[in-house]
Amino acid sequence: MSQTIAFVGVGRMGANMARRLKDCGFQVTAVHDVNREAATSLAAELSCAAPSTLAEVTAAADVIFTVVTHDAAMRSIFFNEDDSLLKDAEGKIFINCATLSPGIHREIYSAAKAVGAQSLEACMASSISHAREGKLYLMLAGDEAVYEKVRGMIEPMSVNRRFIGGPGRAAEVKALVNMVMNINTAGLAEGLGLAAALGHDLSMIREVFSQTGANSRVLETDGGDMCAREHDCWFSAEHAAKDSGIALGLAREVGLNLPLNEATTQQYEKMVSLGLGGLDKSGIAELTFQGRHA
């Protein structure tokens, strides 16, 4: 617990991870976000600094967690010539938790090494409440020796962990996880939408699904929300589009045709184009039920 910790990206996931580590006795010294109000509010809550520059964040901590939304955001915090986490970063450890392309993780791994720092992927397959409760499932990649250095803070954050391999490998597996999850979600939405159009009782349909080969974790988490049109965001349609797109790009790199993933990506991209990207991924049912969005 002697290692000091900072966070870059303190939306709902990042903020809850910081709260969890603070609760577990770790010293969170700085938080930063492009949303200054979110950063200063959390800093007041955690009694830490909210530096205005990335270089100050790096200076304030031994270990810096990043939880940003996409590759472009990741580039902006690591490769900005005017202000970067890599400035005077020798000896620092970066733990990068967002779902990003494997390529950007590999770039950051190499760039960190070039300045005497270290980078570790810690891809999350869990929800906001899991982050607060220390029940994340984490897929890790990079150098296993670096993982061992920070294992003491990783374990209180997670109910389980899997070290995958070298840089980019955890990001590949996370893309697969979200690809399959999103396909399952789209399939469930179509099944429930067709059942509704045929006049079936959807509570009965969900019970039958749960006892047959149509069962899935998504049925448990999203089925009721699809029927009730309750799409409060735990994992947004916009993120689903991004993550399915990452998997689609990986498939193209190795020459594979994945028609189910391609169709699912198009559905989530359609949600974004319709202004529904902020809904939970369960909102894909809005595209399949009669009388909802076309």
Image (tube, helix red, strand yellow):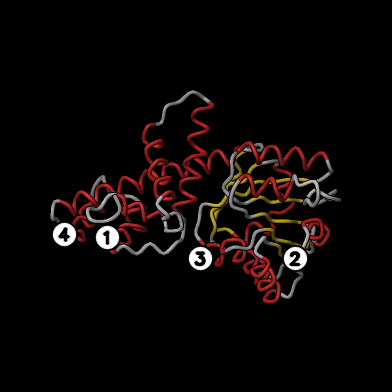
Q: How far across and how far down the image is residue 293, in percent?
A: 30, 53
**For residue 40, what is the image quadrant?**
bottom right
Of badges 1 and 3, nearer the viewer stands: 1
Q: Which residue is tagged 1?
A: 227
Query: Separation of disc 1 and disc 3 at Cα?
Result: 23 Å
Q: Which amino acid is tagged 3?
A: Ser
Q: Relative to 150, does residue 60 appear above or below in the rendering? A: below
Q: Which residue is tagged 3?
A: 129
**For residue 9, what is the image quadrant?**
bottom right
Query: Separation of disc 3 and disc 4 at Cα?
Result: 31 Å
Q: Earlier in the sequence, mark 3 or mark 2?
A: 2
Q: Relative to 173, does residue 69 appear above or below in the rendering? A: below
Q: Relative to 148, does residue 56 appear above or below in the rendering? A: below
- The N terminus sits in image quarter: bottom right
Towards the viewer: 154 or 119: 119
Q: How far across and how far down the image is residue 197, in percent?
A: 17, 52
Q: Earlier in the sequence, mark 1 or mark 2?
A: 2
Of badges 3 and 2, nearer the viewer stands: 2
Q: Which amino acid is tagged 1?
A: Cys
